[in-house]
Amino acid sequence: MLTIGTVVLGVDDLQRAMAFWCAALDYVPRREPREDWVILDPRSGADAGTSIALSQDRSRVSLPPRMHFDLYADDQRAEIDRLVGLGARHIDWDRYPPGADWIVLEDTEGNRFDVIDTSG
């Protein structure tokens, strides 16, 4: 049986991406980052959720992405404001269906993710 251990994101600026995702998800580096690689775990321990690895990768971001994070939020507006304050950007996206419960953002490296309203 397989389980997902780590999701790997390609990034251009490892330090900037690490700062964003650590602040966004309350993650911490598992060990001292290398120049081109770091694994981030939930602050409460690796068993508390999926780890994220950041790998320095100078390739261009594919749009639309073939894979993205869905981040769940009880207070979607507050979380979006917080994430934008950390460096995330709103995406001008015209594919929302009527009544969509998610908003598309991108991180400091152009990796897209959704913030999904779980309040209702």
Image (cartoon, rainbow, N blue to C red):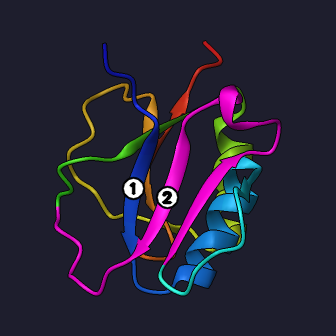
Asked whether 47 falls inside the magenta stretch, the response is: yes
Residue with the mark numbered 2: 53
Which SS class for mark 2? strand
- Farthest right residue in view: 44
Number of callouts: 2
- Residue 73 percent across, percent down from the top left: 64, 32
Locate the C terminus and report the quarter of the image it occupies: top right
Tag 1 secondary structure: strand
Residue range corresponding to the magenta coloring = 37-63
Relative side of 21 to 85, left or right: left
Residue at x 68% of width, y 27% of height: 47
Give the amino acid at mark 2: Ala
Q: Is residue 52 above or below residue 107?
A: above
Quarter of the image for the N terminus: give it: top left
Task: Indicate the quadrant where residue 50 lies.
Answer: top right
Residue 111, visible in the rendered structure:
no
Which residue lies at the image location 22% right of the left edge and 52% below the top edge?
94
Q: Is residue 58 above or below residue 32?
A: below
Mark 2 vs 1, N-terminal side: 1
Tell me whether the residue at label 2 lies in contact with that at label 1, contact meaning CB atoms closer than 8 angstroms.
Answer: yes
- The residue labelled by disc 1 is 8
